[in-house]
Every structure is written in structure tokens, then in C-alpha cells.
Image: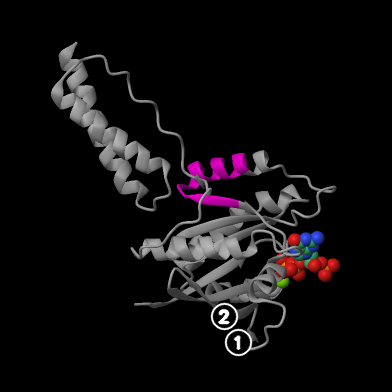
Amino acid sequence: MSKEYLFKILLLGDGAVGKTSIREQFMGKGFSGSYAKTVGADFASHKVSYDGNTITFQIFDLAGQEVYKIARKAFYKGGKAAFLIFDLQDPNTMHNLKTWISDANEFSGGSIGTYIALGNKADLVETRQVSNENATEFFQRLASELGIIFVFLETSALTGLNVPEAFELMGKRLLKKLNVDVDMPSGIELIKPGAKPASPAVSADSGDMDALMAQIGDISEKLSGFDERLDAMETRFNKLAQIVRGLVEKAQ
Ligand code: G3D
Ligand code: MG
């Protein structure tokens, strides 16, 4: 049975990075219907279907920096997720995303829980100034600093590169948070908060320990996959690791 979902998502980022172009690319050139200019923000809605689940994306796109300052509370209210958009030609637009996130947190009252970063204008190869590695490093640092999970994709609103994919990923991440069973796109890497310190080497033998290690192995495997229930699993993982450390100490 197919169900219908409605998600308000925000396009955040400095002027001219390509927010409006990305939205237009996603909605198709010919769209004309549900589009209206509101104070400070453009609003459009677009319906798509993934694995039998129908999603209406309510897409809010800033219309201009100045007007936006007046209207930002209304703009962020009820937002579930945000695309953090920057221009691969301009590192400043990437660094400024930190401010966009803190604004989003403050003005949405914490309702925005899913972020996908888009390095846009990937088609402009000659003038590119941010490498994939630099961007990944930047978001890794930001993930650790803010305790947020990111996905980073390179897009081009001009050629359409990764634009439908970015919305599909966003839709599916949001569905997954609602415990809807969806197939996540393959090959997507999550950028998660800080690497955990390595567990101590286990040197003692014990039947109990083997069983515990098997569980830890199982959980580690799941952790490396795409799973929004990361926090709960990490807590379980850490508890089990603590028990194993206790057993190792006893055996020594
Ligand atoms: P904004 O909504 O974030 O302010 P826009 O940005 O969507 O208005 O885009 C700003 C300019 O960048 C536009 O050019 C637009 O055509 C261009 N642009 C957006 N995305 C891309 C992209 O992926 N590749 C290339 N090559 N250009 C892009 P103009 O000249 O109209 O100002
Ligand atoms: Mg715009």
C-alpha cells in the first residue's frame, strides 16, 4: 500500500551558488503550477515517488539576502531537512555553511535533523577551487564539531549531475527516519562525527567472549552501512566493548 508524505526542506547557501537553479533542475523546466513568491523566500512543491512511497517536497528557497533577514523565522519553521549548497569555485561559500547551519538550528528550533551538502557547478572543471578531498575533510570536521551526519555530493544544476539523486537520497533518509522500509541508493558515504578510539586488542580466550565479539563484529558491520539508527547502535557497541575490556582485564 502506498503512503503519502510531506516534507518541508530548505535550500541554504550564499547568493549565486545555484539554489534556484538546482530547484528548477529538479522540478523540470516546464513546471509552472505550484510556485509562489512569498516574503523573502520562494516556495515550490514537487511530488515524487520512491519505492512506492509518494513524497511531496515543499522546497523553500531564499529569494534574497536582505529580505530574508526579516523573514527567516517563518522560513525555517517546520523545516525537516536542508540542502547546504556551495559553489565549488569559491571556498568561502563552503566555509559560510557553518553559519547557515547555526541559523537553521536556531530558527527552526531544532526541527531540521537531516543535512545533505551539495558542491555545485561541478561542470566548471577549469575554474574549480575546492577538491572533493578538501570538501570531504571540511564536512568531516564540521560533523565532529556539531555532532551532525552529512552526505556530500557534487552537483551541476546545468547538466543535472546528481540533482535527482540528491533529492532521492534526501527523501529516503527522511523516510528511513520514519521507519519506512526503503532501499538506500548504493555507494553513498555518510560523513559521521569523529572517529572513535580503537578498542584494545583482545588476547584472552573465552566462550562468552567469542559470543560478545561476534555481536561486536555484527554491530560494526551495520555501523559501516547506511543506518540512521547510528546513535543507538553505537551505545550498544560501546557497552559491549566495555564488557569485553572487563573480561580481558580479568583474564590477564
Ligand atoms: P542562487 O539561487 O543560489 O542565488 P542561482 O543561485 O540559481 O540564481 O544561480 C546563480 C548563477 O549561477 C546563475 O547564473 C546560474 O545559471 C549559475 N549556475 C547555477 N548552477 C550552476 C551550475 O551547476 N553550473 C553552472 N555552470 N552554472 C550554474 P547567471 O549568469 O544567470 O547569474
Ligand atoms: Mg535564488
Q: In this view, does 251 lie above or below 23?
A: above
Q: What amino acid does circle 1 point to?
A: Ser
Residue shown at 58% from the left, 45% from the top = 139
Residue 43 image position (x, y, % from top left): 61, 80
Q: Which residue lies furthest to the top in this view?
A: 252
Write the residue at 72% across / 59% down. 156
Q: What stretch is highlighted in magenta?
A: 136-152
Picture quadrant of residue 85:
bottom right
Instruction: Name the quarter where the C terminus is drawn.
Output: top left
- Closer to the camera, 234 or 146? 234
Query: In terms of image quadrants, where is residue 251?
Result: top left
Can see residue 112?
no
Q: Is residue 196 left or right of residue 241?
A: right
* Sequence-first disc among 2 and 1: 1
Residue designated by label 2: 45
Visible residue check, residue 28: yes
Instruction: Assign the magenta stretch its main secondary structure.
Output: helix
Seen at 30% across and 38% down, the residue is 218
Looking at the image, the residue that sits furthest to the bottom is 33
Task: Rate crowding at label 2 as few (under 14), some (14 to 19) or many (20 or more) other CA atoms within 10 Å.
Answer: some
Give the image location of residue 65, x and y in percent. 70, 69
Residue labelled 2 has its Cβ within 8 Å of some atom of ligand 2: no
- Residue 208 drawn at (x, y percent): 14, 26
146 part of magenta stretch: yes
